[in-house]
Image (cartoon, helix red, strand yellow):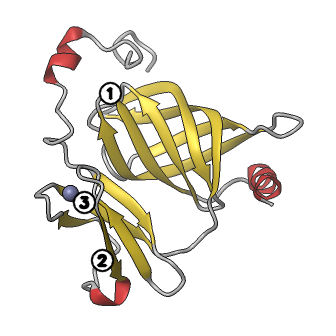
């Protein structure tokens, strides 16, 4: 399981990886957004940055899965609407992630951009072709006085790729008690 080929060295991509990497336009971005308490949301196009407001009540009943969206600029992407409104705390925390990608374990460093009881936005470099639904394990070092470390498991619900950097929306699986407690204190 830890043979040479099972640990993927995505920190140092080979030339082959780079030459076959898709450009952001070819890659199907998936944007995770959060609906407000009354069901309102805003879709920000990753390409042209224009915003389009909407309301959950206008969507078909199966909206919770990522749905296809085409911006007025012509850029197609997927949108995942998180209807549970949780307060998200902007942050800049270091983390270590582990995920399984086509049967291979990938480890790397990442940065948490925001954090809530239910999820986080995680930025990482040199990750390509991430699949929505993949389980991600995170060890996060909080910037509290004791630099507590918490363990998080979550599913990747959205991926936005820009050059060699990806931002992933993570929806947490139930946390173990200690991590849940530490996170609760941190988010106070
Ligand atoms: Zn656009």
Rendering quarter of residue 72: bottom left
Is residue 9 depicted above or below 132 in this figure?
A: above
Q: Residue at x 83, y 40 (%)?
A: 144
Q: Check disc 1 and report the residue beneath it.
A: 164
Mark 2 and mark 3 in contact? Answer it, CB < 8 Å: no
Mark 1 is surrounded, within 10 Å at the Cα level, by few (under 14), some (14 to 19) or many (20 or more) other residues, namely: some
Rendering quarter of residue 6: top left
Is residue 101 depicted above or below 188 in this figure?
A: above
Question: For the view shown, which residue lies furthest in the bottom direction?
Answer: 57
Position of residue 68 measured from the top left corner of the image (x, y, whole percent) = 19, 65
Q: Real-space Cα distance between discs 2 and 1?
A: 30 Å
Position of residue 47 measured from the top left corner of the image (x, y, whole percent) = 23, 49
Q: Is residue 155 left or right of residue 18?
A: right
Q: What element carries label 2?
A: loop
Closer to the chain start, of discs 2 and 1, is: 2
Q: Is mark 3 on a helix, strand or loop?
A: strand
Mark 3 is surrounded, within 10 Å at the Cα level, by few (under 14), some (14 to 19) or many (20 or more) other residues, namely: some
Q: Is mark 1 on a helix, strand or loop?
A: loop
Indicate the quadrant containing the N terminus: top left, top right, bottom left or bottom right. top left
Closer to the chain start, of discs 2 and 3, is: 2
Q: Residue at x 28, y 80 (%)?
A: 62
Mark 2 is surrounded, within 10 Å at the Cα level, by few (under 14), some (14 to 19) or many (20 or more) other residues, namely: some
Closer to the chain start, of discs 1 and 3, is: 3
Q: Real-space Cα distance between discs 1 and 3?
A: 19 Å
Q: Check disc 2 and report the residue beneath it.
A: 63
Position of residue 177 measured from the top left corner of the image (x, y, whole percent) = 77, 55
Q: Real-space Cα distance between discs 2 and 3?
A: 11 Å
Q: Which of 17 and 49 is in front in this view?
A: 49
| Ligand 1 found in image quarter | bottom left
Q: Check disc 3 and report the residue beneath it.
A: 78
Mark 1 and mark 3 in contact? Answer it, CB < 8 Å: no
Q: In this view, does 170 lie to the left or right of 16?
A: right
């Amino acid at each position: 399981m830890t043979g040479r080929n099972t640990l993927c060295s995505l920190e140092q991509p080979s030339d082959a990886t780079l030459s076959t990497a898709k450009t952001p336009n070819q890659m199907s971005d998936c944007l995770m957004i959060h609906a407000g308490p009354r069901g309102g949301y805003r879709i920000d196009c990753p390409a042209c940055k224009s915003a389009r407001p909407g309301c959950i009540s206008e969507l078909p009943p199966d909206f919770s899965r990522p749905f296809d969206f085409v911006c007025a600029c012509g850029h197609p992407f997927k949108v995942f609407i998180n209807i549970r409104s949780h307060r998200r705390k902007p942050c800049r925390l270091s983390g270590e992630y582990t995920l399984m990608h086509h049967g291979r374990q990938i480890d790397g460093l990442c940065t948490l951009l925001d954090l809530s009881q239910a999820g986080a936005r995680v930025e990482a470099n040199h990750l390509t072709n991430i699949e929505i639904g993949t389980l991600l394990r995170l060890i996060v070092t909080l910037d509290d006085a004791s630099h507590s470390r918490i363990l998080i498991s979550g599913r990747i619900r959205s991926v936005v790729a820009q050059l060699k950097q990806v931002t992933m929306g993570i929806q947490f699986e139930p946390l173990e008690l200690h991590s849940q407690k530490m996170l609760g204190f941190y988010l106070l």
